[in-house]
Amino acid sequence: MKRPAILLFCLSLSLYFGSAVEAVYQPTPGQGTVYLTEMGDASKGAILTPIDLNLSLYATTVDRLSFPETVICSPNGDLYFTETFAPQSVGAAASILIHQPGRIVEVPEDNFHRVARVKTNGSAPNYIVEWDDATLLPSSLALGPNGDLFIGSTSKDNKPTQGVWRIRGATQSTTNFNPPEQILPPNLFSPPRKGTSNSVRPMDFLPNGDLLIIDAPVEMAPGGRVLRAVGPGYNSTTTFVAPFNDADTQRPFKPSGLALTPDGTILITDFANDKILHYDAQGNFIGVFVELSSPNQIAVGSDGLVYVTNLRFRGRNVNGGLYIYDPQGGLIVSDTSPIFRRGVAVCP
C-alpha cells in the first residue's frame, strides 16, 4: 500500500515543479509582435521586444538611439520611429554629422532630430527625414491608409509646436522620400503657457479616414484635448474630446496616447488622472476602461488585446511598465522595471 502513495506523491511533485517551470517563461500573449521604446539619451535609447515578461527579459531590435519616443509599424511589419538628440550623455558642446543633398553638415547634437524606418530583419535604419532645427521635435507618428506618414511635434522653450507634417507615400519609398509638408499649422493648437511646452500627436485613424490628434500640455497645465483632422486633406480640425476636469480628481484631462479597437471605439490614456478612457467613434464617452497609474502610450492588437506603457518617477529614478489587458479590461500580465518605456506598437 505504500507504493501507490509514493507514486502519488512523486506525481504531485512532478505536477508542482512542472507548473513552476512553466511559470518561469511568460511569452507576450496575443497575436503579433510587441515593440517598445526605451527613452535613453544619446546611444542609450533602444527599441525592444519582450521575450519573457515574467523575468523582464527583452530583445533589442534597434539600439544606440537617442530618445526614441514613438514607434509604429506598417502592415508589412516595417518599424517607424522618432529620435531626438540631447547633449546630456556627451557634453553640451557635442555635435553630429548629418547628410544633406550634396554636403555633410555638422550641427549641435541637441538641435538634431529625425524620423527613421527599419526593417525587422535587422537591417540598418533608413532615415526618412532629418531636421537640424531645435524648434521642431518630432513627437509621434501615424501611417495613413494610403501610406502617407504623419508627424507631430513638441514645443520647446515656451515656443508653439510646429503642428502636424505629412510625408506622402512614405511606405512606397525605398530611399528617396518626399519632403515633409506642414498640413496643420501651430495656430490650430494650444499655445504653451508660461513655463510649459505643448505636444501635438497624430495617433490613429477613424474608420472613415479622419485622423485623431492629441493636443496636450507636456507639463501639468489645463487644456488637454483630442482633435479630429478631416480627411483626405487633413487641413482642418474639429473637437473630438474637449478639455475637462476629471470628476473624481478634479485634475485636468491630460491625454497621452490613444488607439482604436477592432470594433471602432477609441481608448485614450489620461496620464494625470490614472485612467484609460473609452469613447465611441463620435467622441461620446462610454466609460472608464481601467484605472492605471500614469498610463502613457497605448496600442491595440488585431485580436483586441490592449498594450499600455506607464511610468512612475521616484526621485531621480524612473520605473516603466508594460500592462496587457483583454478586450474587457481584465489584466492579463504586467511587468515593471527601471526602464523609461514610452512608445508601444503591435505589429503583424
Image (cartoon, helix red, strand yellow):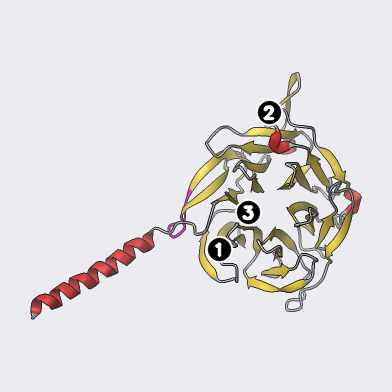
Residue found at the very far right of the displayed protein: 187
The answer to which quarter of the image holds residue 240 is bottom right
Identified at 57% across, 58% down, the residue is: 320
Give coordinates of residue 239: x percent, y percent.
86, 62
In the depicted structure, whether residue 309 falls above or below residue 79: below
In the depicted structure, whether residue 317 falls above or below residue 161: below
Q: 38 or 126: nearer the eye?
A: 126
Residue labelled with disc 2: 175
The circle on residue 324 is: 1
Residue 71 visible to an observer of this rendering: yes
Looking at the rendered image, the quarter that the N terminus falls into is: bottom left
Q: Which kind of residue does numbered mark 3 sit on?
A: Arg
The answer to which quarter of the image holds residue 41 is top right
Q: Please give left or right for residue 108 compared with residue 334 in the image.
A: right
Identified at 65% across, 42% down, the residue is: 80
**Label 3 close to label 1 by CB (< 8 Å):** no
Mark positioned earlier in the residue sequence (1 or 2) = 2
Residue labelled with disc 3: 342
Give coordinates of residue 337: x percent, y percent.
51, 58
Q: Which kind of residue does numbered mark 2 sit on?
A: Thr
